[in-house]
RNA sequence: GGAGAGGUGGCAGAGUGGUCGAAUGUACCUGACUCGAAAUCAGGCAUACCGCAAGGUAUCGAGGGUUCGAAUCCCUCCCUCUCCGCCA
């Protein structure tokens, strides 16, 4: 959520910055709501002040045993007008709130201006493309050759966009996740966390998935007293982990907070019909190791570079070629101020494919969540939150399969994963 | 699932219809005393919004209700704790 003060003080500038990401801010509507709010709020507060003062007099008079019928008659007439004013105020405030909740974050000044993915800026390439003296196969064919990648059965069990791993591939998948977790906890100073996969609406609101992107989520209805209040399946561990600090005031000396979590992620992939239908690239369920940091605002951009480096380390240790891309204003996510994507080289597709996305949200999520720390002056101040995939496990599995394939279709297991594979050095063809 | 007890400021903990936004303790900040610290003493110390300011408004788990007036009474819900049952 943006700071409403920024909109009040410098609406044109906010609108201009939002425009760079293709968002049209209805400034007239905002100004109108603000004007209404001011009028109604002032009026309401005047009425409340009047009522409070009179009621106080009644209490005072009664305590002295005086007659109060005259004053009580006077204040009685306030009731209806006050109720009306309060209701009107609540309506305007709710409208303002929902307008505010649907505004995306302001891109940071350093973010390249652009319309789409095509305008993203490549920051660096690391490693080299592997060369093959045979025709490369994609991970689906490779999975069939060595066995253990079974889409047909997954479809029977659940439907499209689900996968089933068995045997060596299932173990390789687990090995990747474990390797990532161990690296981030042992070498990068993250605290391992195990979190709920079903979360409430307040958490989804906190990180920005709600109210605007409900159709991307899997919703689990449940009865709650009279009505119903849904659970949602997490689309990323960012949601439960970042919400750890919702409504908290973190002591300064505890910063930065750094958490890592390995979780499944559930996405409805609404609006992605027909995209990436083959293979493991785009699924309703996939695993991800997620890095999350909550930091002092002065340090969030340095933290972003570090976090990005932590994610890159995994690819380097796995010996995978990748590039880092800085997303342009038109391509960054709703809540993000700055985002780097890491794209891994996939030889079978002859292209780089997103495997991690690392973002600084500045105070955008913290303001929604009221996630604060006590600053050096002892005052509560909004934190900055960051997160990044470190990495998407399913896509990393794809990258390992495709980059480590041999002429016969077998897969050499990267050195760093072998301890997690019981010393195995190769997945042989079935 | 059944029975009971609770949810108040950073923390602990009073407060059961009227100068209560809330005693007290503790933590923290400032000052005094001290060579310095501890102890002691004095003062300060919730958040948000409106306002140039004076000041005002809201917030005592959430929502609704009663009332001139609600932390306090009523209703619904959520959460926590204790005991019992069930259970990976």
Image: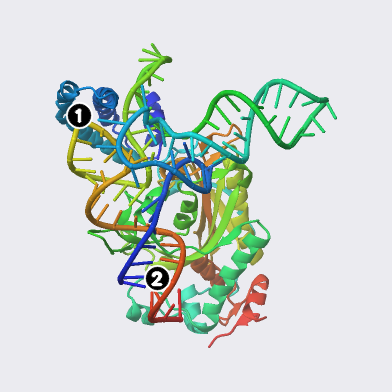
Residue on which the image places disc 1: A82
As displayed, is residue A117 above or below residue A13?
below
Q: In the picture, residue A390 is in which quadrant?
A: bottom right
Does A11 sit left or right of A246 as displayed? left
Closer to the camera in the image, A327 or A41: A41
* Label 1 crowd (10 A; few <14 / some 14-19 / many >=20): some
Does A312 sit left or right of A100 as displayed? right
Q: In the picture, residue A20 is in which quadrant?
A: top left
Q: Which residue lies furthest to the bottom in this view?
A: A430
Which is more foreground, mark 1 or mark 2? Answer: 1
The numbered disc on residue A278 is 2
User: Regarding mark 1 in the picture, which secondary structure is present there?
Assistant: helix
Closer to the camera in the image, A330 or A268: A268
Residue A277 makes an appearance in the image: yes
Residue at x-position 61% and y-position 57%? A190
Closer to the camera in the image, A350 or A67: A67
Q: Residue A115, position in %: x, y?
A: 40, 42
Instruction: Say whether marks 1 and 2 touch (CB < 8 Å).
Output: no
Closer to the camera in the image, A14 or A120: A14
Q: Mark 1 lies on which chain?
A: A
Residue at x-position 62% and y-position 62%? A314
Q: Distance between the residues labelled 1 and 2?
A: 62 Å
Does A391 sit left or right of A49 as displayed? right
Q: Residue A394, position in %: x, y?
A: 49, 68
User: Regarding mark 2 in the picture, which secondary structure is present there?
Assistant: loop
As displayed, is residue A157 above or below residue A92?
below
Q: Residue A243, position in %: x, y?
A: 46, 52
């Amino acid at each position: 959520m943006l700071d409403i003060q920024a909109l009040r003080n410098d609406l044109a500038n906010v609108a201009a910055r939002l425009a760079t990401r293709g968002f049209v801010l209805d400034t007239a509507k905002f100004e109108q709501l603000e004007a209404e709010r001011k009028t109604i709020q002032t009026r309401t507060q005047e009425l409340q002040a009047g009522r409070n003062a009179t009621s106080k007099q009644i209490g005072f008079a009664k305590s002295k045993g005086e007659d109060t019928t005259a004053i009580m008659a006077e204040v009685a007439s306030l009731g209806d007008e006050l109720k009306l004013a309060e209701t009107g105020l609540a309506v305007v405030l709710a409208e303002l709130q929902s307008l505010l909740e649907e505004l995306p974050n302001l891109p940071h000044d350093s973010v390249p201006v652009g319309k789409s993915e095509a305008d993203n800026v490549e920051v660096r390439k690391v490693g080299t493309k592997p060369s093959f003296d045979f025709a490369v196969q994609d991970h689906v064919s490779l999975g069939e050759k060595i066995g253990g990648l079974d889409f047909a059965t997954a479809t029977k069990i659940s439907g499209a966009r689900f996968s089933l791993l068995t045997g060596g591939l299932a173990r390789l998948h687990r090995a990747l996740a474990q390797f990532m977790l161990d690296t981030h906890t042992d070498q990068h100073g993250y605290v391992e966390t195990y979190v709920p996969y079903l979360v409430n609406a307040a958490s989804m609101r906190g990180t920005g998935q709600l109210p605007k992107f409900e159709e991307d989520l899997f919703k689990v209805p449940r009865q709650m007293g009279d009505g119903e209040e849904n659970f949602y399946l997490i689309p990323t561990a960012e949601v439960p982990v970042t919400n750890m600090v919702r409504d908290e005031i973190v002591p300064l000396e505890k910063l930065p907070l750094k958490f890592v979590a390995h979780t499944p992620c559930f996405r409805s992939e609404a609006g992605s019909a027909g995209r990436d239908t083959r293979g493991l690239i785009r699924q309703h369920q996939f695993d991800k190791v997620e890095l999350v940091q909550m930091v002092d605002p002065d340090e969030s951009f340095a933290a972003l570079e570090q976090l990005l480096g932590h994610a890159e380390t995994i690819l380097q240790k796995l010996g995978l070629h990748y590039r880092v891309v800085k997303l342009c204003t038109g391509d960054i996510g709703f809540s993000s101020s700055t985002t780097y994507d890491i794209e891994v080289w996939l030889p079978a597709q002859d292209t780089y494919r997103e495997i991690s996305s690392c973002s600084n949200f500045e105070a955008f999520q913290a303001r929604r969540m009221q996630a604060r720390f006590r600053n050096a002056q002892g005052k509560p101040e909004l934190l900055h939150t960051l997160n990044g995939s470190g990495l998407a496990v399913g896509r990393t599995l794809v990258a390992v399969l495709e980059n480590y394939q041999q002429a016969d279709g077998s897969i050499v297991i990267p050195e760093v994963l072998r301890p997690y594979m019981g010393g195995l050095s190769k997945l042989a063809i079935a």
